[in-house]
Image (cartoon, grey):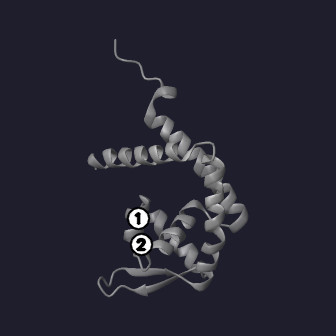
Amino acid sequence: MAERLHLDRFLPYLLSVTSNRVSDRIAQAYDALFGLSIPEWRLIALIAEHAPITQAQLGELSRMDKVTVSRAAIALTARGLLARAPNPGDRRSHHLTLTDAGRALYAEIAPKAMEWERRIFGRFDAHELRQFTDMLRRIDAAAQEDD
């Protein structure tokens, strides 16, 4: 008889469910406080760290698909939070940067994001968090080996 799979002990399932639960909780706060979806917030945060950056680079960094990145970028541009400029290295793409309004929103949200992180992970000590972060990076690297 084949080995039986128990989802409540299957690590990929537990990782996915937990990730979804954390993301959903934070998404509710981003939406209620700032009117942002998770993809929109991720773009703002990544652009704040890496500007100027193309949509393709954002997709690579965030692991979001092209359509999700494109929709988020369009929405943020329409809200006046992102600026698009021609990419001299590739005329088919644009560099994205935060506008003054985008930088102001980021400055408002970043401390809230760190507060939410402390609320969720505050029951772990610094050593446990370093171990957990290291394990997540190793899991990510192992998953990339199959890409």
Residue name at image x 63 percent, y 42 percent: 123
Q: Residues within 10 Å of mark 1 (few under 14, many from 20)?
A: some
Residue 101, horizontal then vertical, whole percent:
62, 82
* 1 and 2 marks in contact (CB < 8 Å): yes
Circle 2: residue type: Gln
Question: Disc 2 on helix, strand or loop?
Answer: helix
Q: Nearer the viewer, residue 40 or 118?
A: 118
| Label 2: how many Cα within 10 Å (few below 14, some 14–19, many 20+) | many
Can residue 79 be spotted in the picture?
no
Q: Is residue 12 in view?
A: yes
Query: Percent from the top left, x then y, of residue 144?
Result: 31, 50
> Please, is residue 66 above or below residue 129 in the view?
below
Q: Secondary structure at mark 1?
A: helix
Would you name the residue on which mark 2 appears? 55
Q: Residue at x 50, y 44 (%)?
A: 127
In this image, 105 relative to 49: left or right?
right
Count the marks.
2
> In the displayed structure, does residue 113 sit left or right of residue 127?
right
| Spot occupied by residue 30 in the image (x, y as percentages of width and height) | 66, 62
Q: In the rendered image, which residue does mark 1 sit on?
A: 59
